[in-house]
Image (tube, grey):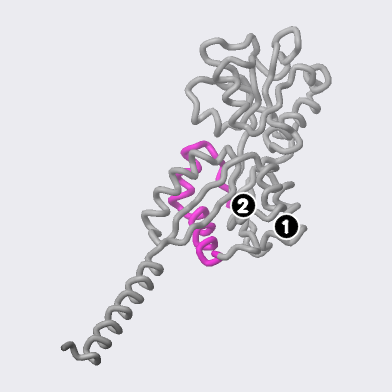
Amino acid sequence: MKNPILVGLAIFILIALSACSTKDAQQTEPVELTISAAASLNEALIEIKKNFEAENPQIKLLYNIGGSGALKQQILQGAPVDLFLSAAIDPFNELTQKGLIDKQTQVNLLGNQLVLVTNKETPANISGFSDLKPSQINKIAIGIPESVPAGKYAKQSLENLGLWEQLEPIVIQTKDVRQALTYVETGNVDTGIVYMTDVYVSDKVKVVATADEQTHDSIIYPAGIIKSSANKKEAELFLSYLQGKSAKTIFEKYSFKVLD
């Protein structure tokens, strides 16, 4: 007959070991950090993710990539985001003014350039912005000015050059800057206005001209931690990493301007 005391002790030990095992599993489970980031940052962030996670296995980065205006709306509607990387100041400032971003963590991270591009194999007959006329081109792609920073900058440039009114009927508006790039790559439009960094990731387009920086607002990518983040310690670590030497090298590789 089994000793009930020994049986009870054995059961207690098994339960204790099981609890310890569960606790250890929980402790080794990486924290998932959700980053909402502008579409133009996609490739650079993918490379940064690989390096960061290798150095910080306790953190898993989850990217939500899209147009800055759309990402702003998601955050306004309560999307569970830890860090926001915008391609423009306005969407970022709106969230800051509404108390959704921790002002103490805000940093102007990067800069960019606006360029006019065309398809490499079937280029449009243009040599600069002054050639953008309905008699020269059939369609031009830009991001939706109201929600895509690159589209807003493009419209500003065209307005300041006195070209917007005549071009508006043939402007194809896209959900983000990468869709504008894709339309040029596939030949669905004659030309498009995107970021210099977008050209780096495409071998199907070529730069026709770079927009004069005086014709549009400064292109600044701000970053900051969402106040409601449940992972502020990890978010601070990643934000600091984005400002470090390793990330800086990657951003510059993709033609971003790193702001001090």
> Does the magenta-highlighted stretch encompass residue 240?
yes
The residue under the point 49% across, 38% down is: 43
Which quadrant of the view contains residue 186?
A: top right
Q: Nearer the viewer, residue 217 or 101?
A: 101
Q: Read off the residue under disc 2.
A: 84
Q: Is residue 181 above or below residue 234?
A: above
Q: Nearer the viewer, residue 172 or 122?
A: 172
Quick one: which residue is furthest to the front in this view?
A: 1
Q: Is residue 234 above or below residue 77?
A: below
- Taking the image as shown, residue 176 lies to the left or right of residue 23, namely right
| Three-letter code for the amino acid on which mark 2 is drawn | Phe
Q: Residues within 10 Å of mark 1 (few under 14, many from 20)?
A: some
Tag 2, which secondary structure?
Answer: strand
The residue under the point 70% across, 51% down is: 92
Q: Is residue 188 above or below residue 253?
A: above
> Does the magenta-highlighted stretch encompass residue 53?
no
The residue under the point 58% across, 52% down is: 260
Q: Nearer the viewer, residue 121 or 176?
A: 176
Please state the horizontal and vertical placement of residue 11, each as a whole percent of the image: 28, 82
- Taking the image as shown, residue 2 lies to the left or right of residue 52, namely left
Boundaries of the magenta span:
231-260
Quick one: which residue is furthest to the left in this view?
A: 1
- Taking the image as shown, residue 153 lies to the left or right of residue 236, namely right
The residue under the point 59% across, 49% down is: 36
Between the residue at mark 1 and the residue at mark 2, the CA separation in whole angstroms equals 11 Å
Q: Read off the residue under disc 1.
A: 96
Tag 1, which secondary structure?
Answer: helix
Q: Quadrant of the N terminus?
A: bottom left
| Three-letter code for the amino acid on which mark 1 is drawn | Thr
